[in-house]
Image (cartoon, grey):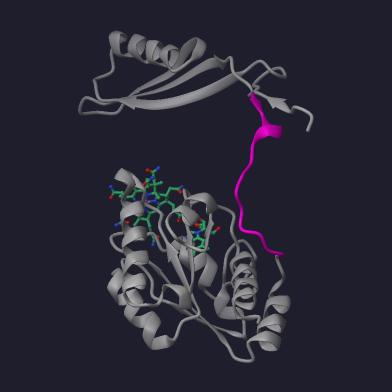
Amino acid sequence: MAEKLVKPYGDTLNDGRVQLSFTLPVALDDAAKEGARQLAMMMGLAEPAVVHAEDMGQDFSFFIVYGQCKHQVDLSSIKVSRPEFETLDKEGVNRLIAEKMRRKMVVIGACIETDAHTVGIDAIMNMKGYNGHKGLESYHEMRAINLGAQVDSEDLVKRALEEKADVILVSQIVTQKNIHLDNLTRLADLLEAEGLRDRVILIVGGPRISHELAKELGYDAGFGTRTYAEDVASFAVHEWIKRNST
Ligand code: B12
């Protein structure tokens, strides 16, 4: 495939101009400003200039640095792993469930462990949905159960068993110190221990979740930002059909 080289631009094409912001754990003074400039240079920016510096109080300072990126990337050489499926609209999903499953698809979702960010899972599951895309609760061939925030993995697994869930949706937003990796691994292990792993379609989502990461952690699919209910629903119904076709 022909090379497709790109680099950032600010004023003119290919000038490489970028803006970088960061905080230093020191009070704002001339040395801190020069330190910020030198750090940007060490990060690979040419001709860095501190264009904004702010005292954040209690020995913290914030900087915005402009500089020039010398690198370019060949987009034609990049492969991004994505779940393979055809995205259907809500009616298409409902039709396929009715035709192939001949019962409602049970979907249970939660934001697990210490994570309290419910907006993402609500966007996928709640009736009103997100950005004009209705959530799974509005799909009449689905029974969508949203357990909300800070759900222990044990409780999610227990409820999934009780409800005979076909699909488990997990949301992980906080990734500080890789806490999401511990949480997601723990849930996958618990499902395995309960003998439930192969019986459910296990899906994780969040702004820093990729399909590749999800597969590495033993999940069936991973979805990141700009995901809508119909993406998840389409993947789930296609996956169910794949597993249940003889
Ligand atoms: C709102 C918010 C909060 C609210 C949450 C309220 C609530 N009920 O959800 C409150 C104030 C409680 C909060 C608290 C904290 N927050 Co906060 N919060 C945010 C904020 C501003 C917006 C998140 C959001 O709602 N996005 C909108 C939704 C629609 O987007 P989304 O979550 O990405 O969801 C989409 C996709 O990711 C995907 N998706 C998500 N989940 C799922 C699941 C499935 C199954 C699928 C298929 C798809 C999917 O689909 C969604 C729709 O497209 C972000 C910053 C930001 N701008 O993103 C910080 C942010 C997430 N918070 C952060 C932090 C650090 C915290 C705190 C730790 C702060 C603190 N020191 O106390 C606490 C932690 C609380 C806790 N125990 O979890 C950090 C996380 C950093 C990191 N990488 O870990 C962020 C990024 C802010 C930052 N830049 O530092 N927060």
Q: Left or right: where does residue 28 sit relative to residue 123?
A: left
Image quadrant containing the C terminus = bottom right
Magenta stretch bounds: 73-86
Decide whether residue 74 is among the magenta residues.
Answer: yes
Give the farthest residue toward the right.
Answer: 2
In the rendered image, residue 47, in percent from the top left (x then y), is placed at: 52, 8
Q: Nearer the viewer, residue 111 or 80?
A: 80
Decide whether residue 213 is among the magenta residues.
Answer: no
Q: Which residue is depicted at the point 39% across and 10% down? A: 38
Q: Nearer the viewer, residue 21 or 76?
A: 76
In the rendered image, residue 140, in percent from the top left (x then y), is placed at: 62, 85
Q: Main secondary structure of the magenta part?
A: loop
Q: Which residue is depicted at the point 43% across and 65% down? A: 170
* Quadrant assignment, res 245: bottom right
Give the farthest residue toward the bottom.
Answer: 102
Q: Left or right: where does residue 34 sit relative to residue 218?
A: left
Image quadrant containing the N terminus = top right
In the rendered image, residue 181, in percent from the top left (x then y), is placed at: 35, 52
Q: Left or right: where does residue 216 sit relative to residue 11?
A: left
Q: Which residue is depicted at the point 64% across and 91% down? A: 102
The correct choice, above or below, for 76 with respect to 243 in the image is above
In the rendered image, residue 115, in percent from the top left (x then y), is placed at: 33, 59
